[in-house]
Image: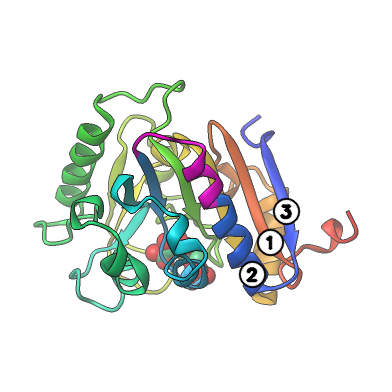
């Protein structure tokens, strides 16, 4: 079963959610005394987490020189565009704290999303040291994820061919299903799943309907996304589906 390692953890509100996420990221960093790889996500859900990582006591607990930061999907816009996912993470914490060589953006200065995908796949493969993912050696320590109103995650939209990709690690997505309607570049399910922990952050009443569908269905991209290690859904009280209340 794709999701039998999925665990839903409930917290009170977005502030508690960001703290719980920060603690989980720090625990994964602490568990690896070697080079650490974290795959960030875009959208608004991780913003508070990114702010926390730049703040004490979290900031001091991160061994910045040996932590590498990747991004799970990108909007195909310039690095300086306010819509750029890695641009948001850089602005909120990375540019102040991470060595430049440890920040791995998707190269949106490429000719098109497919070329950007190929370049990022090569970068990931050279970081990993192999072209094929080994289930005993996850690519990432942590992969952060969010869920969109249509059940997409990263830039893997329902019924788009990218969701079925089994070989490539990164793909170009010519058209988005939701705003912003710009082409995307996305890691695929096998690449995102090659991690010790996949961590979804979901907050707010507006997410409750889609979260109910994602947790019940097996078919939406966010339902299919899972780690070869642990898959954690951190959910605040407002987003929590009715049938999870009181569990
Ligand atoms: C993006 C994201 C996307 C996001 C969800 C949730 O590029 O927009 O990576 O997959 O995580 O759409 O977005 P919110 O956090 O803004 O609700």
User: As drawn, which residue projects farthest toward the bottom?
Assistant: 82
Q: Tell me, yes or no, if residue 28 can be seen here.
A: yes
The quarter holding residue 176 reads bottom left
Q: Position of residue 113 (x, y in %)?
A: 20, 55
Q: Which residue is mark 3?
A: 9
Determine whether label 1 and label 2 are within 8 Å by CB.
yes
Element carrying mark 1: strand
- At 56% from the left and 42% from the top, the residue drawn is 224
The quarter holding residue 99 reads bottom left
Q: Position of residue 124 (x, y in %)?
A: 25, 39
Vertical comparison of 217 with 14: above or below: above
The numbered mark at residue 235 is 1
- At 31% from the left and 60% from the top, the residue drawn is 74
Where does the magenta region start and end? 25-35
Decide which of tag 3 and tag 1 comes sooner along the chain: 3
Q: Measure how far apart labels 3 and 2 are at the Cα level.
A: 12 Å
User: As drawn, which residue projects farthest toward the right?
Assistant: 246
Q: Is residue 27 magenta?
A: yes
- At 35% from the left and 56% from the top, the residue drawn is 73
Decide which of tag 3 and tag 2 comes sooner along the chain: 3
Dot 3: few (<14), some (14–19), or many (≥20) neighbours within 10 Å? few
Dot 1: few (<14), some (14–19), or many (≥20) neighbours within 10 Å? many
User: As drawn, which residue projects farthest toward the left?
Assistant: 111
Decide which of tag 1 and tag 2 comes sooner along the chain: 2
Q: Nearer the viewer, residue 55 or 132?
A: 55
Q: Which residue is mark 2?
A: 203
The response on whether ligand 1 sits within 8 Å of label 2 is no
Q: Measure how far apart labels 1 and 2 are at the Cα level.
A: 6 Å
């Amino acid at each position: 079963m794709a999701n039998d390692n999925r665990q839903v953890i409930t917290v009170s509100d977005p502030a508690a959610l960001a703290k719980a996420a920060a603690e989980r990221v720090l625990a994964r960093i602490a568990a690896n005394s070697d080079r650490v790889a974290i795959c960030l996500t875009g959208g608004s859900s991780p913003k508070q987490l990114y702010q926390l990582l730049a703040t004490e006591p979290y900031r001091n607990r991160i061994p910045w020189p040996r932590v590498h930061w990747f991004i799970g999907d990108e909007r195909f816009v310039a690095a300086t565009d306010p819509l750029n996912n890695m641009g948001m993470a850089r602005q909120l914490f990375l540019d102040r704290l991470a060595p430049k060589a440890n920040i791995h953006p998707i190269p949106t200065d490429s000719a098109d999303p497919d070329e950007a995908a190929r370049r990022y796949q090569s970068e990931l493969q050279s970081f990993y040291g192999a072209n094929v993912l080994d289930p005993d050696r996850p690519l990432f320590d942590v992969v952060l994820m969010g869920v969109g109103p249509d059940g997409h995650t990263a830039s893997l939209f329902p019924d788009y061919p990218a969701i079925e990709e089994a070989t490539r690690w990164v793909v170009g997505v010519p058209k988005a299903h939701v705003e912003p309607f710009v082409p995307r570049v996305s890691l695929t399910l096998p690449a995102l799943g090659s991690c010790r922990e996949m961590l979804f952050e979901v907050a707010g009443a507006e997410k409750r309907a889609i979260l109910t569908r994602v947790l019940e269905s097996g078919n939406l991209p966010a339902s299919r996304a899972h780690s070869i290690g642990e898959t954690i859904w951190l959910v605040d009280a407002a987003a929590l589906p009715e049938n999870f209340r009181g569990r």
